């Protein structure tokens, strides 16, 4: 199965550039992400890690280059199909993006409500995921009343909630102490073991040391500098 043509790629980027105005943010990114991979995107602040994750989440369009999702060229997928496609992704945003006037419970439940699941099923599942992320007691709280670390754990719970095949996590431990950070990392690792493809972007290289086997992509100034197996 090592044959190049036989790989189970779910996302492929070919010579992708991303510009913001006149500034070239991502430069000639070529990347092949296979189903079930664990990928750690490392790089200093402003390396464009978040830009890369937003591109992978299909939240922003590339300026040049191609994206293939399951072998389909994104340029040929109608934009009305994007929300459906995005449901396969779980994203932990660096700034959480929780809905401020919805409770913790509602923020997490929304994912499956949008997918039309039964409310009894959703209720059980929300409480399960909040329990694993240590946020069960706060299920009625509104995000602005929570600490940064608590909001981050809700964001992680929400990202994994619909059992997405691809989890994109942008600095998912940035607001956590080292013990909670390890817990979140272990939690994401469980989804990786359950076949999800997991991408974590972080400037914190300590996280790498506690990560199991996977791929490390080093990015700097919007360029992939190095790819190594962990
Ligand atoms: N919408 C935008 N318009 C203009 N510049 C942007 C936009 N989004 C991000 N950037 C720029 O991208 C650079 C950093 O990218 P970012 O992906 O946040 O880095 P990292 O996540 O590695 O810290 C910054 O210089 C930031 O100003
Ligand atoms: Mg970032």
Image (tube, helix red, strand yellow):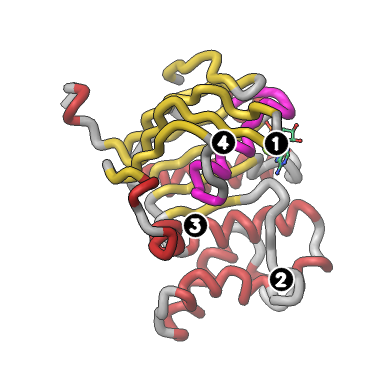
Residue 44 vertical position relative to residue 88 in the rendered view, above or below:
above
Q: Earlier in the sequence, mark 1 or mark 4?
A: 1
Which residue position is annotated with label 3? 160
Which residue position is annotated with label 4? 52
Residue 20 lies, in percent from the top left, at 68, 36
Name the image quarter holding residue 117. Answer: bottom left
Which residue position is annotated with label 1? 21
Q: Which residues are magenta?
A: 42-59
Name the image quarter holding residue 50. Answer: top right
Which residue position is annotated with label 2? 138
On whether ligand 1 comes within 8 Å of the CB at mark 1, the answer is yes
Residue 192 lies, in percent from the top left, at 41, 43
Q: Residue at x 45, y 63 (%)?
A: 83
Q: Disc 4 and disc 3: Cα gap in Å?
A: 20 Å
Q: Earlier in the sequence, mark 2 or mark 3?
A: 2
- Position of 16 with respect to 102 (left or right) is left
Q: Earlier in the sequence, mark 4 or mark 2?
A: 4
Seen from the viewer's position, the closer of residues 83 and 65 is 65
On whether ligand 1 comes within 8 Å of the CB at mark 4, the answer is yes
Q: Residue at x 37, y 34 (%)?
A: 12
Residue 54 lies, in percent from the top left, at 57, 44
């Amino acid at each position: 199965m090592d044959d190049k043509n036989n790989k189970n790629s779910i996302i492929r980027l070919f010579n992708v550039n991303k510009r913001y105005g006149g500034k070239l943010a991502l430069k000639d990114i070529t990347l092949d992400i296979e189903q079930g991979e664990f990928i750690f995107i490392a790089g200093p602040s402003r390396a464009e890690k978040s830009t890369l994750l937003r591109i992978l989440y299909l939240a922003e369009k590339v300026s040049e280059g191609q994206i293939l999702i399951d072998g389909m060229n994104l340029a040929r997928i109608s934009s009305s199909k994007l929300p459906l496609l995005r449901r396969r992704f779980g994203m932990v945003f660096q700034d959480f993006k929780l809905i401020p006037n919805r409770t913790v419970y509602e923020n997490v439940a929304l994912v499956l409500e949008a997918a039309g699941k039964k409310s009894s099923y959703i209720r059980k599942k929300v409480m399960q995921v909040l329990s694993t992320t240590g946020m069960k007691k706060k299920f009625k709280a509104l995000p602005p009343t929570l600490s940064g670390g608590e909001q981050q754990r809700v964001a992680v719970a929400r990202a994994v909630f619909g059992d997405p095949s691809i989890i994109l996590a942008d600095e998912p431990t940035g607001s956590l102490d080292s013990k909670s950070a390890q817990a979140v990392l272990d939690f994401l690792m469980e989804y990786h073991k359950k076949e999800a493809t997991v991408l974590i972007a972080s400037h914190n290289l300590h996280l790498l040391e506690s990560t199991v086997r996977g791929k490390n992509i080093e990015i700097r100034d919007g360029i992939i500098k190095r790819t190594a197996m962990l």
